[in-house]
Amino acid sequence: MGFYVAQILTGLANAGALFMVASGLSLIFGVTRIVNFAHGSFYMIGAYIGYTLMQTLPGAIGFWSAILLAGLAVGLVGLIVEVLVLRPVYKAPELFQLVATFGVILVIQDLTLMIWGPEDLLGPRAPGLRGVVHIMGEPIPKYDIALLVITPFVALGLWYVIARTRIGILVRAATQDREMVGALGVNQAWLFTGVFALGTALAGLGGALQLPKGGADLLMDFNILTAVFVVVVIGGMGSLPGAYLAAVIISVVNVFGVTFLPQSTLVLIFLVMVLVLMIRPYGLLGREEVAGEHGQVGEPEVPIQPAGRRSRALVAVGLLVLAALPLYGSSFIQVLATDIMIFCLFAASLHFLLGTGGLVSFGHAAYFGGGAYVAALLITHAQTPMELAFLLAPIGAGLAALIIGWICLRLTGVYFAMLTLAFSQLLWSLVFQWGDVTGGDDGLVNIWPADWLKPTTIYFYFSLILCVGGILLMRHIAHSPFGYSLRAARDSERRAEATGINTRHVRWMAFCFAGVLAGLAGGLFVFSKGSIFPNELEIARSFDALIVVFLGGVKTLAGGVVGGAFFKGVEEILTRFEYWRLAFGLLIILVVTFAPQGIVGSIRKIFDRKVETRS
């Protein structure tokens, strides 16, 4: 009995810091409707600032003062970020706001590296709370007991602010109907700023509080981000009581999982998330998600038309130049061009889903990495011929998309995006922890193409034909009756249903088709590299595709291709420098702020202005 009590107490202690970070994220989303992917970065800098202050302020008073000051300092940083980065894009579509927060992640990562260096920092012990106490014969760290006491006080403080103060009334009102709050004369801009600063301060407080249990390192932003989103989604986006309940559930499940199922801890967390959303689509204590006033991706200013003669001529010239690459390019250039083409196909498959269908998926890497693993597993364990394994890669990815899409399309908006993320992370955790079959973190190697495809030039042309063919197929479907039905479902679901279109069926088929094309890109990728690792299924890979789609232009059919080529080219140049994330993050923020139409959209806008000027 004592063992189980100790496990529960440990889980509750771990839930403390997790709740503080999750409550801040939930609060921000509830009022501003922004899914702040930079929230883990504020948690990270809270840990680093707390560490620095603890080295300066002596004694127990200094230790606890350092934690509070770290939270305040991070809140100030959050205020600056909100005013400079997010406030200019509040009226933009939700995807643009998400991309802006991703740029913030990259900037904070490199600024943290510049200030504190690359070494991990070991957190100091809390004065007076070293050692353990024995409860029912089981040792419990004294600091865990302190966290058990601190967390309820923080939760009660939040409850008092939200439920008993005028500011809290405004926050709750904005959560329910922020347009009405603005109509009543409340300055929404500063309300959003205050809520964002409070949410980031809570993240910083959580980061500083966990120092004695872990320390500070440059990977802790992404490490906590997944768990925080799981908690917020399970509890219900915007619900503080839900965040606390979910933090307790996830922490206790994780503690018992480490003890009894050490090879399945990651799987258990995402399995809980998937099960909760299947039973309660909006979380345990959440409410139905209200879409942003400008939609997830926004609407095109003019209907998307088939390419004109000039555009087709430019594409034809570009393809001829690309096809002639082996005549003037080295083997390295051919390999780089192959990588870019594969990534463009992957990004274009997401763009088809996102731009044409209006479905924002946070887990599209599941089908890219899934297709690659299907081929690799068949060759490794069944000695399947390369040709057959390659053929089955997109089919396997399409089957996964068929099942996942059927479940996810029960939801809309942010909850749909989060459920796609949950399934993607579930697949990643299975691959990562099922080492006997998938190779785990070591991946699967020696997955090479057949002998007739091994020459670099031959594989380049093989990839060129399939990638260009896949992209052209997507463009053709976008202008087919199916594509117009998909756009109708995106623009006005009720009107589309009234005309006889089965919008759920159309979206489901689009989801499967995008999964097949992503799986095709994954099959090309694994045979190009000769190996596959779990990182191709991670959140970061899905984010790369989202960034690419945005950079190219969400409202254009060429956005995924142009964005993919631009992303890979810039990445190839910037990664040679030490602080490339800082430069790339600033570039993303500048594009979000000053050129939200993306590369293709901005060029088209400039061209249209010149035409208007001449006429």
Image: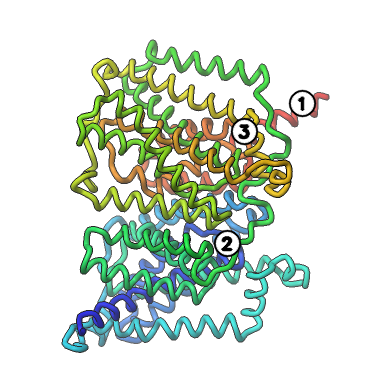
Q: Residue furthest right?
A: 615
Q: Which sits earlier in the primary sequence, circle 2 or circle 3?
A: 2
Is disc 2 placed on a helix, strand or loop? helix
Image quadrant where residue 141 sits: bottom left
Is residue 197 among the parts visible in the rendering? no
Q: Where residue 163 sits in the image (x, y, percent)?
A: 60, 83
Compare residues 88 and 388 and report the one nearer the observer. 388
Image quadrant where residue 454 sits: top left
Is residue 163 among the parts visible in the rendering? yes
Q: Closer to the observer: label 2 or label 3?
A: 3
Query: What residue would you read off at disc 1?
Result: 611
Residue sitting at 39 percent across and 77 percent down? 67
Identify which amino acid the numbered label 1 is placed on: Val
Q: Which sits earlier in the primary sequence, circle 1 or circle 3?
A: 3
Separation of marks 1 and 3 at Cα, in angstroms: 33 Å
Image quadrant where residue 28 sits: bottom right
Q: Which mark is residue 82?
A: 2
Compare residues 47 and 278 and report the one nearer the observer. 278
Residue sitting at 40 percent across and 25 percent down? 337
Query: What residue would you read off at disc 3?
Result: 482
Q: Where residue 388 sits in the image (x, y, percent)?
A: 30, 26
Is disc 1 placed on a helix, strand or loop? helix
Left or right: residue 283 versus residue 598 is: left
Separation of marks 1 and 2 at Cα, in angstroms: 37 Å
Identify which amino acid the numbered label 2 is placed on: Glu
Residue sitting at 69 percent across and 32 percent down? 606
Position of the N terminus by quadrant: bottom left
Identify which amino acid the numbered label 3 is placed on: Phe
Q: Closer to the observer: label 1 or label 3?
A: 3
Sort mark 3 into few (<14), some (14-19) or many (20+) by Cα contacts within 10 Å: some
